[in-house]
Image (cartoon, rainbow, N blue to C red):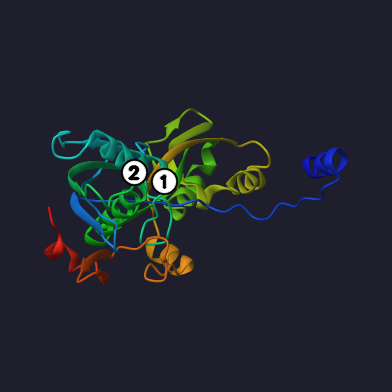
Amino acid sequence: EVLKELVKTRYDVFIDFGPCEIIYLESIKEPVIGRGHYEPLKHYAEVHLRLEPAPRGAGITFASQMHVDQLAESYQNLIRSHVLERCHKGILTGSPLSDVHITLVAGAAHELHTSGGDFLEATCRAIRQGLEKADNVLLEPYYEFEIEVCLNLLGRVLHDVQLAHGQFLPPKTTDCKAVIKGMVPVVNFMNYGVELMSFTKGEGRLTLQVKGYDVCHNPTEVIKKYNYDKFADRLNPSASIFCAKGSGFVVPWDEADAFMHC
């Protein structure tokens, strides 16, 4: 209410706040090779990328194992910028891709027909094809928590944490107090402070700190809720485009490897 009134007073703008929404991420479980080719008439670029799972919190990282004699440094830098600066969508919910290390393993350009935008198309298609091949995983944010309650309420708190799909270390107890530490999905613990204050009559203590992202505890439910149609997402295609007899044609991701030039 204070923020709403402040914005209204300063800027004469009315704002409102809705329920909190969880921001999910997507990643992969094992290394794959993704290939993308973009060759409509008078355009040309081909990119082969190795996608590997990275440590949690690493985001998207990039490396190239190609020599400048194989592909010009300027083109390699274009691929690097397209990998790192673009928000790549996953194929489960359309959430941002994260915690993936991407390595340029092969690529090709044409002396006359290649422009910078061609490598954007080929790079994005290579990443998308790699995701189609991969075993994808949905990630959600987790809290690191510490709860202090009276000893007689220890069982209630442990039960609540288990219901919230959390994990906890062995509790530390004294004559009258218990301290529980662990991690729990943010989505299940956003309002737990109010509940804790209620059943402890204001004597309980809850400390929350964002730990980062880890594997989602209910991916099937979340995927169903988002209802993301990867085939209808025309801004993130997985198919490649090749050229024959003066015209381009589309090859689906699961057939494209046989058409690649590198």
CB contact under 8 Å: marks 2 and 1: yes
Q: Position of residue 72 (x, y in %)?
A: 22, 37
For label 2, the crowd category at 10 Å Cα-Cα, with few meaning under 14, some 14 to 19 and many 20 or more, is many
**Kind of residue sitting beneath label 1:** Arg
**Residue drawn where x is 63% and y is 42% of the image:** 200
Quarter holding the N terminus is: top right
Toward the top, the furthest residue is 174
Q: Position of residue 152 (x, y in %)?
A: 53, 41
Q: Which of the 4 quarters of the picture holds residue 222?
A: bottom left
Q: Is residue 68 left or right of residue 141?
A: left
**Residue drawn where x is 36% and y is 39% of the image:** 81
Q: Can the viewer see residue 145? A: no
Q: Which mark is residue 194?
A: none
Residue situated in front as seen by the camera: 163 or 92: 92
Relative height, residue 148 to residue 43 (above, below) = above
Residue situated in front as seen by the camera: 104 or 109: 109
Q: Is residue 201 left or right of residue 137?
A: right
Residue situated in front as seen by the camera: 88 or 121: 121
Relative height, residue 50 to residue 238 (above, below) = above
The residue carrying mark 1 is: 86
**Residue drawn where x is 45% and y is 45% of the image:** 141
**Kind of residue sitting beneath label 2:** Val
Q: Is residue 228 left or right of residue 251?
A: right
Q: How many tags in the picture?
A: 2
Q: Position of residue 136 (x, y in %)?
A: 29, 57
Alpha-carbon span between mark 2 and mark 1: 6 Å
Helix, strand or loop at mark 2: helix
The residue carrying mark 2 is: 83
Helix, strand or loop at mark 1: loop
Residue situated in front as seen by the camera: 247 or 65: 247
